[in-house]
Amino acid sequence: MSSDIQGIVTTLLRTKGISEFNEWRLKNLTLKLNLDGIDLSGLDLSGIFLNGASCVGSNFCKTNLSRANLVQSDLSMANFENSNLNSALVMYSDLSRCNLSRADLTGTNLMWSNLNHCDLSYCIIAKTILVESNLSQANFTGVDMSTAFLKYAKGDNNLKNVSV
């Protein structure tokens, strides 16, 4: 995607709001959004349609992404520290090496997602769906996984004391 399109996306998000961005997105579903390295920290992006977007290394720190559609997105190395992803759809996405520390993942659907080497320390995992996700080398320090759905999740020693 050219920098012109990235500028259009940024302007829509920062000035027009989510409903106008989503309307534009629905008209441009075949367009591969490249938002690599973009800084969207602190914004209210609840309900946004970023499905299929590339957001490698992007900053979503303290961003409200509740009910967001991030299905099949490349979110590797992105920063979601202290973000709200409550009830977000993040299936089939790459979150490898991303920072989700202290994020709210209540009810978030991460089925079939790659969270390899992801920092999930002190995040809220309540009724979070991690079925068949790759959790290898993920950091779960300070996380209560008792209500997470982990069936067939792939992991290593970080999951040995977690009931699935």
Image (cartoon, rainbow, N blue to C red):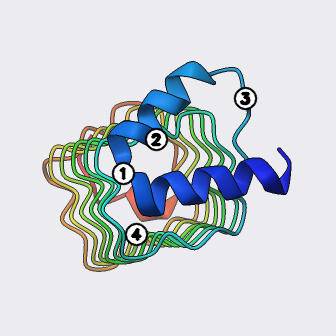
The mark that comes first in sequence, 2 or 4, is 2
Say which element carries label 3: loop
Residue 110 visible in the shown view: no
Query: Which residue is at a point 69% across and 58% down the rendered structure image?
Result: 7
The mark that comes first in sequence, 1 or 4, is 1
Q: Which residue is label 2 attached to?
A: 21
The one nearer the camera, 85 or 140, is 85
Between disc 1 and disc 4, the foreground one is 1
- Using a 10 Å C-alpha cutoff, classify the residue at mark 4 as few (fewer than 14 neighbours), some (14 to 19) or many (20 or more): many
Q: Could you tell me residue 11's position as x and y percent?
A: 56, 59
Residues at marks 1 and 4, CA–CA distance in whole angstroms:
29 Å
34 sits to left or right of 108: right
The one nearer the camera, 154 or 19, is 19
Between disc 3 and disc 1, the foreground one is 1
Which of the 4 quarters of the picture holds residue 149?
Answer: top left
- Using a 10 Å C-alpha cutoff, classify the residue at mark 1 as few (fewer than 14 neighbours), some (14 to 19) or many (20 or more): some
Q: Which residue is label 4 attached to?
A: 120
* Residues at circles 2 and 4 in contact by the CB criterion of under 8 Å: no
Between disc 3 and disc 4, the foreground one is 3
Q: Which residue is label 1 attached to?
A: 17
